[in-house]
Image (cartoon, helix red, strand yellow):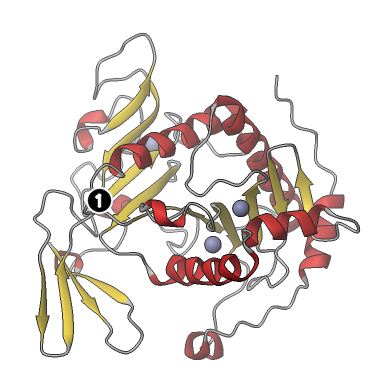
Amino acid sequence: MSELRKDPITGRWIIFIEERRHRRRHLPHQYQESPEEQVCPFCEGKEHLTPPEIFAFRRNNSKPNTTGWNVRVVPDISPILNVEKEFKSKGIGIYDTMDGLGAHEIVVESNIHNDNYDSMSIDQIKDIFRAYNQRITDLSKDVRLKYILINKNFRSGMGTHMPFHHPHSHLVAYPFIPHIPETECEGAKVFWNYHNRCIYCDIIAQELNEPNERVIYSNEEFVLIAPFSSRYPYEMWIIPVKHSYIFSGNDSQFESLAVTFKEFINRMNAVLSNPPYNFIIHSSPLSEEFREYYHWHIEIRPRISQVIGFEWGTGTYTNAVLPELAAKEMREVDVKSIDVY
Ligand SMILES: [Zn+2]
Ligand SMILES: [Zn+2]
Ligand SMILES: [Zn+2]
């Protein structure tokens, strides 16, 4: 059970998870402490080691919680937020608290233990995005939920002591709009009120214009850029070219996204020698009010630098690599072209 507390000064919500106090933070670590410690719970054939699945793409009408899947979604066994709860908030003097209502799911991205985006087919990556879309669509029916974040940590923060690297990502649904997406929404709204246009659409239009110096790759549906005010070295964003506020798409759009994603992975791995990285998907909050001025996107952070005290203390980042230079390297590096068909 978790408890949410709001910082009365900045308005930020903090999630306290008491039961994790004596545990390590991440699901695979918890399994490391279980009797089956050397067994990977995400491998095909080990479905009984996870809680019952929420959703899966299955082959040949195979039954839930058996083999025969290629993407599988299960609850996190130690969720930071929990869906089966009543929504309760209370004030204690000047302080606000809420029960930890929400959802925390693991998207097992492949049935192959050591699979990776660079070894996966376009179809497999497309299915991961289709699974995200399916879960976002389903969870957004719960009116108590306000925001959904997809988050991937690849060899990042967990160190090399992880017993296995089965590819997976996290989906967390929040009963509030977290601080960073809220700040983006506010900025996009101010721009919309002034210009009557979406700021992200304007960014894409400007970046795709000559001289294109921050564009790494683009196709009809997506653009991969090093953003003008990158906080981190080699930070990248993937943005849909057509205005779209919530993470969604049809088959061909998810295929284009998978191709763009493969471009980012191949180019980043070539330039930075397979670095650890994070990516998050910033989709609109679940309310319709953001549909005109918010524009979903993926933010990617190669973990080649550390956040230092100044940044922690001020939110002002120092970055040793100009995005124009990062984009040039990423664009010009020699990678084999992606075979879609
Ligand atoms: Zn595995
Ligand atoms: Zn837009
Ligand atoms: Zn964002």
- Pointer 1 local density, CA inside 10 Å: few below 14, some 14–19, many at least 20: many
Q: Position of residue 295 (x, y in %)?
A: 56, 54
Residue furthest to the top in view is 60
Residue under label 1 = 103
- At a point 48% along the width and 44% down the height, the residue shown is 247
Image quadrant assignment for residue 87: bottom left
Does 267 sit above or below residue 299?
A: above
What amino acid is at disc 1?
A: Ala
**Figure quadrant, ligand 1:** top left
Horizontally, residue 25 falls left or right of residue 51, namely: right
Residue furthest to the right in view is 211
Q: Position of residue 265 (x, y in %)?
A: 66, 46
- At a point 30% along the width and 13% down the height, the residue shown is 62
Q: Position of residue 221 (x, y in %)?
A: 68, 38
Does residue 162 appear in the picture of this structure? no
Mark 1 residue element = strand
Does 17 sit above or below residue 275?
A: below
Does 189 sit above or below residue 61?
A: below
User: Which is nearer the eye, 15 or 308?
Assistant: 15
User: Which is nearer the eye, 233 or 6?
Assistant: 6
- At a point 49% along the width and 29% down the height, the residue shown is 127
Does residue 78 appear in the picture of this structure? yes
Question: What count of labels does the image hold?
Answer: 1
- For the N terminus, the quadrant is bottom left
Q: Position of residue 312 (x, y in %)?
A: 49, 85
- For the C terminus, the quadrant is top right
- At a point 34% along the width and 27% down the height, the residue shown is 56
Does 206 sit above or below residue 323?
A: above
